Amino acid sequence: MVAGGLSVLFCGINPGLMTAATGHHFARPGNRFWPVLHLSGFTPRQLRPDEQEELLAYGLGITNVVARATARADELSREEYVEGGRILTGKVERLAPRWLAVVGVTAYRTAFGEPKAAIGPQPRMIGSTRVWALPNPSGLNAHWTAATMAEEYARLREAAEAPGA
């Protein structure tokens, strides 16, 4: 679910089985992406996964690092991440969003060969696109609450809304 000239292109790790079955990103009920997107101010209300097309009206899109659906991201190989990073780079160069937000710092590290990357803005740019690593909203990520994730997502939103962003 992408378009040219987006403000932020969110990039999940890969489709989960529920996403693959429904065709809707972040579809698993325990995933916190949609609540966090709203809590951080990206959307005026909490969208449901089946309303994902509405994101385009807000200048937002969603894609994945790896296209293959799995039950868990740890089922993906390093090679899949690296190839996904290469494909994602081409997509970002073509679409030129202002920001690429990789949802999962471990996925970012592996896909882009940045083993020391931390959550937040990255020094890497893809063409004119800036890059931000966000915490993974999966319910399996117990290190972050919805509230603390929303704070980090809001930092990205503020950067994306800043003049000249």
Image (cartoon, rainbow, N blue to C red):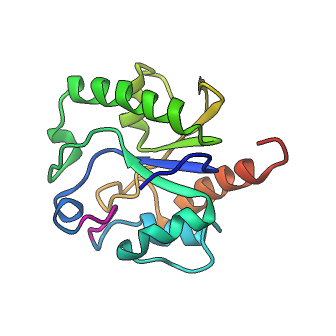
- The picture quadrant where one finds residue 124 is top right
Position in image of residue 56 (x %, y %): 54, 62
Position in image of residue 21 (x %, y %): 16, 65
Image position of 48 (left or right of 161): left
Magenta region includes residue 26: yes
**The magenta segment:** 23-28
Residue 142, above or below 109: below
Q: Is residue 139 visible?
A: yes
Question: Residue most toward the right?
Answer: 163
In the foreground, 147 or 61:
61
Q: Quadrant of the N terminus?
A: bottom left
Magenta region includes residue 27: yes
**Residue at horizontal 29 percent and vertical 68 percent from the top:** 27
In the foreground, 80 or 115:
80
**Residue at horizontal 41 percent and vertical 53 percent from the top:** 143
Question: Residue most toward the bottom?
Answer: 45
**Residue at horizontal 18 percent and vertical 43 percent from the top:** 68
**Residue at horizontal 51 percent and vertical 33 percent from the top:** 94
Image position of 85 (left or right of 18): right
Position in image of residue 25 (x %, y %): 34, 61
Residue 99, above or below 47: above
Q: Is residue 147 visible?
A: no
Position in image of residue 107 (x %, y %): 36, 36
Secondary structure, magenta segment, majority class: loop
- The picture quadrant where one finds residue 42 is bottom right
Image position of 74 (left or right of 117): left
Residue 135, above or below 36: above
Q: Quadrant of the C terminus?
A: top right
Image position of 49 (left or right of 58): left
